[in-house]
Amino acid sequence: MSTERKKVIAGNWKMNKLPNETMDFIDKLIPLVQNTENEVILCVPFTDLFYALLSVQDTNIKIGAQNMHYEENGAYTGEISPNMLKSIGVQYVIIGHSERRQYFNETDETVNKKVKAAFKNELIPIVCVGETLEQREQGKAEEVITTQTELALQGLTEEQVKNTIIAYEPIWAIGTGKTATSEDANNSIKAIRNKICQMYGQNVAQSVIIQYGGSVKSSNCTELFTMSDIDGGLVGGASLDIEEFSKIVNFKK
Ligand code: PGA
């Protein structure tokens, strides 16, 4: 059944690139990824979204944001709402990235609220889960990631869960050059899928796209993305480089 799931490669630019760099990057990326059967998403800073959306018109590249508030409007100075994203044509949004959990006080509760708000506004959430090195060394990795998954998805319909993208990103592998072994990553993702199976049944669990993230690059992506349960990747550093990112999108199966 796993072969029916498509591979989804999403770039997470984090706080990088100005509008002119965004447009230049996308113009050069378009011909390099136009023949892929994999889904290609670029999650760019808020100030780049509009330029990115103009640049990808009539191409196979989709655009996502990296965060949003869960309310649709109100006195939340500096925040961006789901319907604001939707109104300009954004289709995806990263929710609960570990950097947001770590530096901006995101909790499992706000993650759940944001996931629900995303679906209400027809945005597809890319929900990040992952354990710290300490939690891994204490043998708690599986418990941490399955609990994060359960709390993130709480209250969603089967259809919504089927359309959710989950990114398993072990925190110790993000931006460190350390990658989980493909087997470890696959086992963690299987544990997440099992949790979804317990909550929503086999059919839903087998439909959910679950990516791996954490120091993905062109030299390790094939090994990771050809594992049974890994459905592509959320790519940080390597997504800032056109050639490197296009190689990852076009990884050899
Ligand atoms: P990295 O980041 O690929 O630079 O490790 C991944 C992420 O944080 O999404």
Image (cartoon, rainbow, N blue to C red):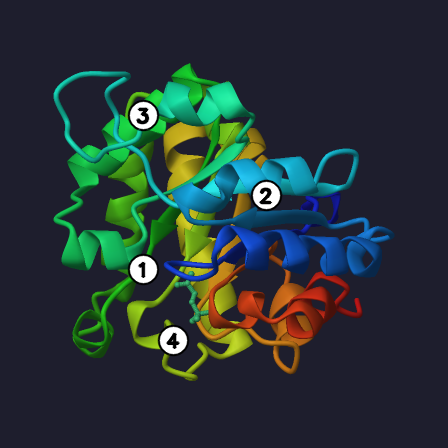
Identify the residue shown where x is 39% and y is 19%: 83
In three-dimensional space, the C-alpha distance between marks 3 and 4, rounded to whole angstroms, equals 28 Å
Is residue 250 found left or right of 48 in the rendered image? right
> Which quadrant holds the N terminus?
top right
Q: Nearer the viewer, residue 150 or 246?
A: 246
Amino acid at the residue labelled 4: Gly
Indicate which disc, 3 or 1, sits on the residue closer to the N terminus: 3
Q: Is the CB–ligand 1 distance for label 4 below 8 Å?
A: yes
Tell me the tag on residue 8: none
Residue annotated with mark 1: 130
In three-dimensional space, the C-alpha distance between marks 1 and 4, rounded to whole angstroms, equals 14 Å
Amino acid at the residue labelled 2: Ala
Q: Is residue 232 visible?
A: yes
Is residue 251 found left or right of 239 in the rendered image? right
Identify the residue shown where x is 24% and y is 46%: 147
Tell me the tag on residue 175: 4
Identify the residue shown where x is 21% and y is 79%: 137
Number of marks? 4
Identify the residue shown where x is 37% and y is 71%: 174
In three-dimensional space, the C-alpha distance between marks 2 and 1, rounded to whole angstroms, equals 28 Å
Pointers 2 and 3 in contact (CB under 8 A)?
A: no
Residue annotated with mark 3: 81
Residue annotated with mark 2: 52
Indicate which disc, 2 or 4, sits on the residue closer to the N terminus: 2
Amino acid at the residue labelled 3: Ser
Q: Work out which residue is located at the far right of the displayed protein and give it.
A: 35
Query: Where's residue 116, x and y in %?
Result: 33, 23
